Image (tube, rainbow, N blue to C red):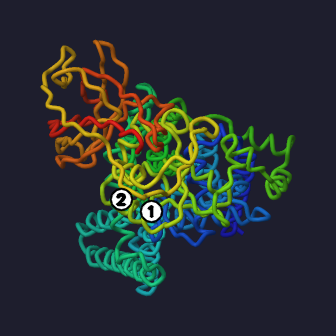
């Protein structure tokens, strides 16, 4: 009976978690104005798989084929198939993945009994820990750590079982990689560090290294087999493309997606206190073997928060360390008769955590009450099951009635990232990098362009910055992906000058003759402005549509501990600023060329038309590192190698 108590407790709380998750999923996709960046990629994951396009093989993105399968499983619950109407079920599938992985972690921790499970679930509910739809990411890494703990734990001498648990840890690392690539290396790194620490112990090194060898072997063989499978099923895939471009995505994310720390000083101090307590408690409780691998993976996961430090990334990256703190608490409370001091200290630290954690509150209880007294979870699922949205409700105004010229509708590229549009128009999605802002390195942009080149009949829905598209972190789309802009400008033309909705335009492939700009190199002088910025002045006021910069930015080695800070560009004319934008590096020290648009946002689409665009005058450009925090590493050197003024030729 006692043995069955733990699974029963986990099942009950998992059911409650599922009910809360159902109440939290959105009722639908929403109207056009409500559809943001995240919704676009969430809807695109199942639709691309439905169109036989696999993440890592046919396109590249932060989330891999396992996340794609999860989203597809959720979308399949809607009848009939409609990715645009499946958002509630896709989000629910993500929540269910987190529920199942967390339940598996507790089941694998033998020293956590049913009473401790109740405490942990109650603490999670009070903090809303792992409540984000993508909380399966840190949980998957924690599962890798727990499986490796099962393989190397003391008192476990059955060789077949040691091999089985080690193999399970290796497969878990590979599966985590298929969710989002960095989790695989993080999981293997956890095993390496844990094995290294355990090897120091007398008589334990051989076993630790044996288990590690199995984990690494399984992980490598699985990656080789995946590349072989992708090679056999796609003629455009080259061996190790998946791994190569995933690493490029990570490298590009580091340079192009950095954000300063957004959590206030008080809560940050509180989380620091709790984190230090958790680390000290894990070291103090070293005889409890489960703490070492969880501590290692928690510290490794903290690296994610040093790059993009907005509130969501902070809480998700810190969540494994918070769980470690809660796990230490159940051990201290169970031993309170032995040492009341540690229990009191932990309780005081939990109080600090409660007031510091952004999501702490009674939301869990409120959702349960809502499920019991308002719309039931089953009723909500029944409505979502047959949800039907008209295309004109989600598409930019007028686009639903825009018919393609040919007999059959061509595939569509949504640039820079509105993938919900081709989904709602029932077109095949062309998105070589699912969200173009992720294509922030030259190899990824070259892959993107090569993929577009294979599409002989392609239509583009282009969303202008600041009107149809949010400029991610104030970086213009053409600045972030200059090679892709080069290709679009050279091969596509404006179908109509009339916008769809607010700032959307259709482009069609048209390459009868090459298109270029009137280009003049600007021989400028570089001085230091009064505010310390680098100031660039042309010999005389200059009029341009675009600027093409060839620039190199060197960053100190400390960028590896934090994040490279982008630079701000401020343009002046007659002493008055008229444009502020941001420039990110592609890599440290390497020169790259990119574009800055000086065209008013509501006229940018005219670049793809045949008429000339009045050039914008400017007489000064200031470049200064963006204000950041202690994690930000400003460029140690900015080298402007070339500045060109580009003006669109009339009639081109």
The image quadrant where one finds the N terminus is bottom right
Query: On the image, which quarter does residue 170 sit in?
Result: bottom left
Residue 565 falls in image quadrant: top left
In the picture of the structure, the residue carrying the numbered disc 2 is: 444
Image spot of residue 508 (x, y percent): 53, 54
Query: Nearer the N terminus, badge 1 or badge 2?
Result: 2
The x, y position of residue 323, in whole percent, is: 50, 49
Residues at circles 1 and 2 in contact by the CB criterion of under 8 Å: no
Whole-angstrom CA distance, mark 1 to mark 2, is 12 Å
Labels 1, 2: front one: 1
Q: Residue furthest front?
A: 651
Mark 2: few/some/many CA within 10 Å (<14, 14-19, 20+): many
User: Considering only vertical position in the picture, is 107 above or below 167?
Assistant: above
Q: Secondary structure at mark 1?
A: helix
Residue occupying the point 30% across, 68% down: 195
Residue at the far bottom: name it. 160
Q: Is residue 52 left or right of residue 280?
A: right
Q: Measured from the top left, where is residue 113 in percent x and y?
A: 59, 60
Crowd tier of the residue under label 1, counting other residues whose Cα lies within 10 Å: few below 14, some 14–19, many 20 or above: some
Reading the image, the residue beneath label 1 is 452
Left or right of 299 in this view: 495: right
Residue at x-position 68% and y-position 36%: 362
Q: Quadrant of the C terminus?
A: top left
Q: Is residue 429 left or right of residue 349?
A: right
Q: Dot 2: what SS?
A: helix
Q: Position of residue 523 (x, y in %)?
A: 14, 31
């Amino acid at each position: 009976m006692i043995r069955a108590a733990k699974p029963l407790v986990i099942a009950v709380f998992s059911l409650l978690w599922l009910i809360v998750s159902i109440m939290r999923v959105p009722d639908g996709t929403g109207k056009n104005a409500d559809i943001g960046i995240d919704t676009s990629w969430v809807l695109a994951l199942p639709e691309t798989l439905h169109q036989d396009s696999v993440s890592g093989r046919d396109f590249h993105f932060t989330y891999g084929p396992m996340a794609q399968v999860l989203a597809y499983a959720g979308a399949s619950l809607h009848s009939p198939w409609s990715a645009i109407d499946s958002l509630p079920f896709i989000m629910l599938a993500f929540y269910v993945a987190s529920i199942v992985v967390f339940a598996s972690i507790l089941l694998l921790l033998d020293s956590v009994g049913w009473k401790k499970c109740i405490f942990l679930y109650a603490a999670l509910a009070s903090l809303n820990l792992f409540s984000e739809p993508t909380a399966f990411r840190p949980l998957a890494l924690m599962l890798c750590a727990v499986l490796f703990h099962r393989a190397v734990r003391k008192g476990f001498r059955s060789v077949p079982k040691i091999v089985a648990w080690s193999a399970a840890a290796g497969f878990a690392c590979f599966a985590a990689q298929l969710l989002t690539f960095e989790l695989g290396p993080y999981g293997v790194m956890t095993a390496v560090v844990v094995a290294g620490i355990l090897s120091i112990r007398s008589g334990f090194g051989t076993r630790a290294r044996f288990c590690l060898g199995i984990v690494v072997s399984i992980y490598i063989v699985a990656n080789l087999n995946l590349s072989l499978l992708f090679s056999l099923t796609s003629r455009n895939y080259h061996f190790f493309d998946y791994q190569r471009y995933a690493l490029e995505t990570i490298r590009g994310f580091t340079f192009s997606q950095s954000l300063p720390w957004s959590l206030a000083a008080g809560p940050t101090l509180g989380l620091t206190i709790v984190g230090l307590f958790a680390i000290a408690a894990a070291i103090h409780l070293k005889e409890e073997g489960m703490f070492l691998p969880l501590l290692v993976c928690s510290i490794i996961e903290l690296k994610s928060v040093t790059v993009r430090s907005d509130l969501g990334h902070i809480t998700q990256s810190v969540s494994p360390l918070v769980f470690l703190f809660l796990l230490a608490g159940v051990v201290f409370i169970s031993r309170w008769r032995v040492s009341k001091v540690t229990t009191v200290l932990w309780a005081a630290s939990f109080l600090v955590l409660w007031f510091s954690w952004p999501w702490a509150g009674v939301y869990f209880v409120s959702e349960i009450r809502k499920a019991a007294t308002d719309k039931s979870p089953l009723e909500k699922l029944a409505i979502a099951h047959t949800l039907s949205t008209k295309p004109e409700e989600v598409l930019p105004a007028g686009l639903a009635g825009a018919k393609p010229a040919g007999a059959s509708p061509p595939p569509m590229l949504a640039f820079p990232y509105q993938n919900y549009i081709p989904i709602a128009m029932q077109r095949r999605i062309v998105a070589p990098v699912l969200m173009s802002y992720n294509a922030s390195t030259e190899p990824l942009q070259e892959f993107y362009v090569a993929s577009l080149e294979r599409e002989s009949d392609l239509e583009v829905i282009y969303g202008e910055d600041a009107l149809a598209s949010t400029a991610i972190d104030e970086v213009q789309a053409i600045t972030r992906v200059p090679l892709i802009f080069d290709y679009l400008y050279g091969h596509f033309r404006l179908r109509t000058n009339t916008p769809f909705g607010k700032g959307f335009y259709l482009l069609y492939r048209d390459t009868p003759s090459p298109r270029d700009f009137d280009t003049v190199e600007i021989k400028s002088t570089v001085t230091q402005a009064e505010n310390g910025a680098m100031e660039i002045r042309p010999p005389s006021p200059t009029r341009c549509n675009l600027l093409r910069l060839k620039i190199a930015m060197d960053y100190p080695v400390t960028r590896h501990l934090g994040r490279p800070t982008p630079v701000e560009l401020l343009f002046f004319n007659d002493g008055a600023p008229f444009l502020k934008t941001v420039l990110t590096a592609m890599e440290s020290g390497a020169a790259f060329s990119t574009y800055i648009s000086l065209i008013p946002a509501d006229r940018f689409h005219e670049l793809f038309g045949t008429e000339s665009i009045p050039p914008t005058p400017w007489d000064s450009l200031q470049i200064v590192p963006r204000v950041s925090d202690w994690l930000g590493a400003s460029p140690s050197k900015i080298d402007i190698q070339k500045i060109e003024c580009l003006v669109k030729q009339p009639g081109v």
